[in-house]
Amino acid sequence: MKRHISFILLALYSLSAFAWSQKGHDVVAYIAECHLTPAAADSVSALLDGRSPVYWANWLDNASHTPPYAYTKTWHYKNIDAGVPYDQAPLEPKGDVVTATREQIYILSDSAATRDQKVLALKILVHVVGDMHQPMHMGHYSDRGGNNVKVRFFDRDTNLHSIWDGSLMNSAHSWSYTEWQQQLDRLNAEQEAAEVAGNIDTWASQTHSIASRVYDYFPENSKVSYNQIAAWSTTIEQQLLRGGLRLAHILNAIYDPTSTVKATEL
């Protein structure tokens, strides 16, 4: 019995190492869906057989634990140690969240790619763009993106990565993913343009900078409670909104022939 319980706890810990909670990925996917142009929406719907991107938003977290998709395990993050500039970080040989994002964009933009290849690329893209905006997915290599940084969340022992995956977000607001979109997605056109400016590296580097601030604020054995949730809820809201707007920006660049942005240049 004890062995069975230990296995379950280990499995849950392994899952916590991956991404925003299910809710977080749903929020990013839904915000993106709300900002697709008609042409992009039609193309995305055709690839997903009429299902919403939300349906597949968290799929990769589970798939990465299965043999057919084990090659994607490192695609959820880009770990960079303290003091290492973003543009000088060593490359992960098996790929990271930045290279994975660009690879899916290339496949979706490639007229020679098969439909099956494009469907898989779209499912992966919906997820990894969300991951790129979770600060601990751009955390330190030496502590596995905060997984080895112990903190106490109210009366529970946990780690820095885990509380950023879901605990902070879910404690800040108990909204459904549609309510998150309704409350966050209120920028005017000029503000939206500012958020999607740049490219994949611009966005990832921005998240990396936030991760540095997170480490400074949450040293080892930090006690996390109401004050800490309040202090970081705005950042979480901002990152979820950015993830959704930028995912839509990518998909519109791929599928809308009137787009002035070339997806392969992102």
Image (cartoon, rainbow, N blue to C red):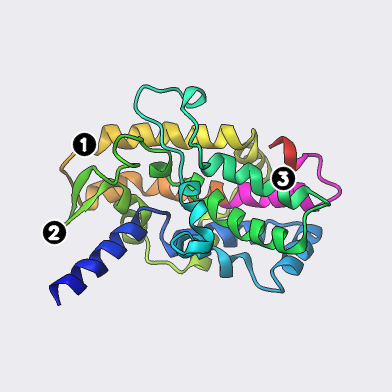
| Residue at figure coordinates x 69%, y 62% from the top left | 119
Tag on residue 6? none
Q: Which residues are magenta?
A: 244-262
Residue most toward the bottom? 1
The percent coordinates of residue 12 (x first, y second) are 30, 64
Q: Is residue 180 visible?
A: no
- Dot 2 lies on which element? loop
The percent coordinates of residue 156 (x first, y second) are 16, 58
Work out which quarter of the rendered image holds the N terminus and state it: bottom left
Work out which quarter of the rendered image holds the C terminus and state it: top right
Q: Main secondary structure of the magenta part?
A: helix
Magenta stretch: includes residue 255: yes
Q: Is residue 237 visible?
A: yes
Tag on residue 155? 2
Closer to the eye: label 2 or 3: 3
When the figure is inspected, residue 7 is found, relative to residue 211, above or below; the finding is below
